[in-house]
């Protein structure tokens, strides 16, 4: 156990000497996909609650597809599936993009988390109390100002508990990245396992790292809720 | 049969190239694995929920540890950890007892592993649902002279199911999608079948999309079934009309 830690603590945490690995890689995967997913899901969630079917349905179809299929398959399609099409390999730009495992992984993760986040935000826009929107309209806010100043600030705050769940699920989902040769925590654990045959210890260390990150994220979101959701709590 | 159907529908451009039976076997494996794991995890969830709600700290503490640890660690990590360690532990036990080497069936190990992981999620679902049953119901049942087991079977369980169903549905969808990971530990499920078919025909994209569509079909069908069950178990309750 001690030798395992002595030999592998560096790759488990940040680097194997050449590449970023382990925890640093997992956090990079998580933050990149969460950031892209968040930014894209805001316009999509507004489209998702649109009263125009032509706007609403494509988004609904997208979230249905990506929430109804496993992330692992989505990753396989992005990483091995798309690159197996000859037409993709013939295009220099697409070829360069899909040849890189990192690009494919972040693309698959971002598309997946964006679908879930869109539904979360759309749900809280829908559950917005009508008085709030009517008051905003009475003040003369319309169009994007209505969304930017009233609806989105309120909807994003109220979706914080669900969003924190999604971020933690996404942290747990990043583990499939090793199947696309991305050297995340689990990849290091597998390497350590095949080199030392200390199965329980190798995967146990990985499990402990994930557990710690999960607890830290839960704590951070609790702080964020205390800051931004205080108005929903009992009055003092 | 599948092949003939494809031919008849004029879809031969989308032919399965003789991999239909393999895909069907993979789909069957996925369904079998997820249904059996669901059964294991529901049983574990009920046990866990009763332990968590028990008045004895000796029962509460391990259940609390179980749900916190399992839900804080990614399912794939746990899967690899348990799946590979199960065999090691069993071998060391058989070695110590001078028994013959017992090889764990990968399918059984997969069911146990998935059931153990999702049992923690079901524990939380059932705990919430049991707490949602009004206290007076149990007290009334006690007043009628029902015994502990009868109280659970006739009074708490039917009412609890209504509160638990949305959670069960969610967990089932997550569990079903998590079974896609078992191909990583070497089980011949739908993902493995589509990868094999795709690699040997050089049409990986097509077969992977096909597998995704089959998953979509299963999730949509189970969604439909859940709606039906929710209607059935919400008999006798109503929601405010908006």
Image: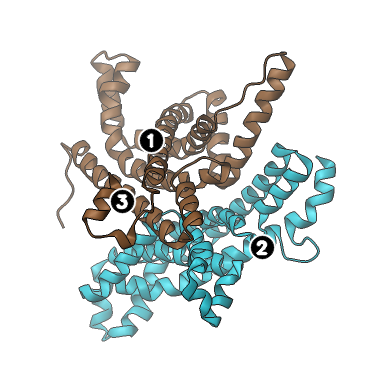
> What kind of element bears circle 2?
helix
Residue under label 2: A25
Residue B156's x, y, as percent? 30, 27
In this view, the mark in front (2 or 1): 1
The quadrant in which the N terminus of chain A is found is top right
Residue beneath disc 3: B217
Residue found at x 72% / y 65%: A20
**Circle 3: element type:** helix
The type of colouring in the image is by chain
- What distance separates the C-alpha of mark 3 from that of mark 2? 34 Å
Provide the letter of the chain coloured cyan: A
Q: Secondary structure at mark 1?
A: helix
Q: Chain of mark 2?
A: A
The colour with which the image depicts chain B is brown
Quadrant of the rendered image containing residue B89: top right
Chain at numbered mark 3: B
How far across and how far down the image is residue B54, in percent?
A: 46, 25
Q: Which numbered circle lies on residue A96? A: none
């Amino acid at each position: 156990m001690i030798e395992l830690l002595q030999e592998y603590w560096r790759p488990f945490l940040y680097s194997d000497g050449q590449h970023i690995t382990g925890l640093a890689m997992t956090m990079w995967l998580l933050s990149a996909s969460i950031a892209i997913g968040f930014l894209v899901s805001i316009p999509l969630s507004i489209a998702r609650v649109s009263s125009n079917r032509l706007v609403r349905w494509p988004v609904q179809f997208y979230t249905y597809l990506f929430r109804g299929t496993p992330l692992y398959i989505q990753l396989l399609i992005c990483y091995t599936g798309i690159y197996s099409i000859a037409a993709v390999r013939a295009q220099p730009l697409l070829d360069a993009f899909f040849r890189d495992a990192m690009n494919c992984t972040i693309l698959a993760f971002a598309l997946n988390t964006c679908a879930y986040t869109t539904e979360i935000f759309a749900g809280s826009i829908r559950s917005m109390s009508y008085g709030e929107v009517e008051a905003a309209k009475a003040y003369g806010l319309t169009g994007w100002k209505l969304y930017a100043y009233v609806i989105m600030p309120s909807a994003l705050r109220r979706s914080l508990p669900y969003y924190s769940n999604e971020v933690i699920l996404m942290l747990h989902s990043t583990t499939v990245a090793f199947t696309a040769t991305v050297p995340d925590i689990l990849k290091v654990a597998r390497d350590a396992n095949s080199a030392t045959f200390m199965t329980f210890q190798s995967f146990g260390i990985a499990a402990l790292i994930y557990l710690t990150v999960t607890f830290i994220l839960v704590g951070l979101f609790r702080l964020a809720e205390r800051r931004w959701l205080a108005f929903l709590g009992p009055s003092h | 049969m599948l092949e003939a159907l494809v031919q008849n529908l004029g879809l031969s451009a989308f032919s399965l190239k003789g991999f239909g039976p393999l895909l069907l076997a993979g789909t069957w494996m996925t369904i079998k694995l997820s249904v059996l794991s669901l059964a294991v995890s529901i049983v574990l969830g009920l046990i866990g929920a009763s332990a968590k709600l028990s008045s004895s700290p000796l029962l509460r503490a391990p259940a609390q540890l179980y749900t916190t640890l399992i839900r804080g660690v990614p399912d794939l990590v746990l899967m690899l950890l348990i799946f590979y360690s199960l065999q090691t532990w069993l071998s060391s036990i058989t070695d110590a007892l001078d028994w013959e080497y017992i090889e764990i069936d990968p399918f059984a190990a997969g069911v146990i592993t998935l059931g153990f992981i999702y049992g923690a999620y079901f524990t939380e679902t059932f705990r919430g649902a049991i707490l949602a049953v009004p206290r007076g119901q149990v007290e009334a049942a006690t007043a009628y002279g029902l015994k502990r087991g009868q109280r659970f079977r006739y009074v708490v369980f039917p009412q609890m199911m209504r509160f638990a169903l949305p959670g069960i549905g969610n967990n089932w969808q997550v569990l079903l999608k998590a079974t896609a990971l078992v191909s990583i530990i070497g089980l011949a499920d739908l993902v493995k079948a589509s990868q094999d078919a795709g690699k040997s025909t050089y049409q990986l994209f097509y077969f992977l999309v096909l597998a995704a569509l089959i998953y979509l079909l299963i999730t949509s069908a189970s969604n439909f079934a859940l709606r039906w069950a929710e209607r059935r178990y919400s008999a006798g309750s109503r929601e405010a009309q908006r």
